[in-house]
Image (cartoon, rainbow, N blue to C red):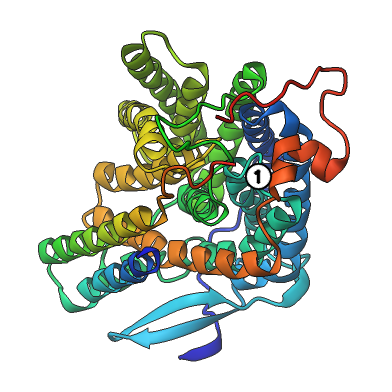
Amino acid sequence: MNAAAPMIPIPEAAMSETVFAFTLALLLLAPLAIAGMALVNTGLARSRSAAQALLGYLALWAVTAIGFALVGASFAGTLKTHEIVLHAGGKTWSVLGLDPWLLHGLGSAAPQMQLALLFEFMAVAMAAMVPWGSGADRWRLPGGCASAAVLSGFVFPLVAHWIWGGGWLAQLGANFGLGAGFLDGGGAATVHALGGMAALALVWIAGPRRGKFPREGLSTAIPGHNAVYVLFGCLLALVGWLAWNAAGAVIWLHAPLAALPETAINTLLSAAAALVATYSVTRVRFGKPDASLCANGWLAGLVTSTACAALTTPLEAIFAGAVAGIFTPLLVEVLELALSIDDPSGAIAVHGASGLWGLVAVGFFAPQAGQLTAQLVGVAALLGVILPLIYLLYALLNRVVAFRVDPDGERIGMDLHELGGGAYPEFVIHRDESYR
Amino acid sequence: MKYAGLLVMPGGFFLTLAALVLFPDAARRLAFVVCGLAVEAMGLAVAVRGHMPARGASRP
């Protein structure tokens, strides 16, 4: 092991001022994706937890921004000053960045590196927010903030370095001749697969909502409280996602500006195909289309597009989105009914499974030899290292900051319990009819 | 059982790494990477099974 080895600078074409300004403008629109996702997940939670849910998104964003600035950005190694490398099998494996702490040197870094860091600030926020929706109605705000601190301080930077910071996954092409190395232009791995796996670890550790899985019969349906939030959130997310994928294509894949319209079109097509597929599946399964599952399908298409949009043709984007739109409602159903996993926002299917599918789809459609293998190695790293790591960290964290609210708090709702007031004070609070 | 499944998953990952280092030809490398993923899938299945709550466990 060679700790803190200085990185050999790879010559990159300097970014023109036009490209810099345009990419910066795109990045300033990207938070709309996070806002849309927050609105969707708040609508999918109960009304008695709505204020806590939305405040949680703000709090998690704050924690991730500070945590990433203080610690995480150093490990991500975006400024490419130092790194921790291993030597094995005659190859060099860069496993962790070691840039200066506290964003030291940011002002003098190259413009494209500053943009990359700004992108990572958005990405780490979204990654940490994905599990928050899965823990709706039972996950305490301190626990959520502790999770965000761990994800932004270590887990996200680790994955970001592997993929975006010149780490061993990015070097698969140079070291082993596997296409262009692991490709993830918009954060399908670093944001969505990571967030989906964190959601899975969370629901395993926190357990289901009370009354969700009664002693007899099927699981209890606990519908979201506001379908308008959910569906409007989808529209808002589209705007953010268009900007997000275009910015990612420029920053991580060095796409020219002329390629961005196709990236945006592919993003839209992927979401559209996913929605049509989910609409059709739920129409066939239940006799009528299901609004919340259609919203999940739309988001699944957008998540798939984060991997595919900049690297596929429009037809391939439609195919990838349609596949995500077909398996998302089915997986949501299997997780709840067959596997007793209580995921109110559907994040495991929407972000986890669709993110992984998008990464594999890139490998299927890529013209370079070995790209599919590179993508599969990346998926294996996420499932084989990052999921157990998150589970271990969450299990330890849960002993320090209890994730789950006490039964009384869950009964009266997270708003009253944690905030002392509800999101809708003029509404009549009905007694809980879901407990059997 | 839940921990056993999570311990098996890194085993699958190391299989994919071994495939990269040991096999120079693309077909065999891809096959062993897929095998590594299959091991991870089995570990995930065991972990999921281990985490399934007994019916009624969450009943208030």
Identify residue for label 1: A138
Residue projecting furthest to the top:
A287
Residue visible at 44% across and 46% down in the picture: A352
- Quarter location, residue A319: top left
Judged left or right of residue A214, residue A206 is right
Q: Which element is circle 1 on? A: loop
Residue A337 appears in the picture as rendered: yes
Rendered location of residue A45, percent (x, y): 64, 31
Is B18 situated above or below A172?
Answer: below
Rendered location of residue A416, percent (x, y): 82, 37
Is A33 situated above or below A85?
Answer: above
| Image quarter of the C terminus of chain A | top right
Marks counted in the figure total 1
Judged left or right of residue A129, residue A108 is right
Is B13 situated above or below A201?
Answer: below
Residue A165 appears in the picture as rendered: no
Rendered location of residue B51, percent (x, y): 41, 55
Q: Chain of mark 1?
A: A
Residue visible at 67% across and 63% down in the picture: A110
Q: Nearer the viewer, residue A286 or A77?
A: A286
Is A41 situated above or below A2?
Answer: above
Circle 1: residue type: Arg
| Image quarter of the N terminus of chain A | bottom left
Judged left or right of residue A128, residue A257 is left
Rendered location of residue A208, percent (x, y): 53, 44
Circle 1 residues within 10 Å: few <14, some 14–19, many ≥20: many
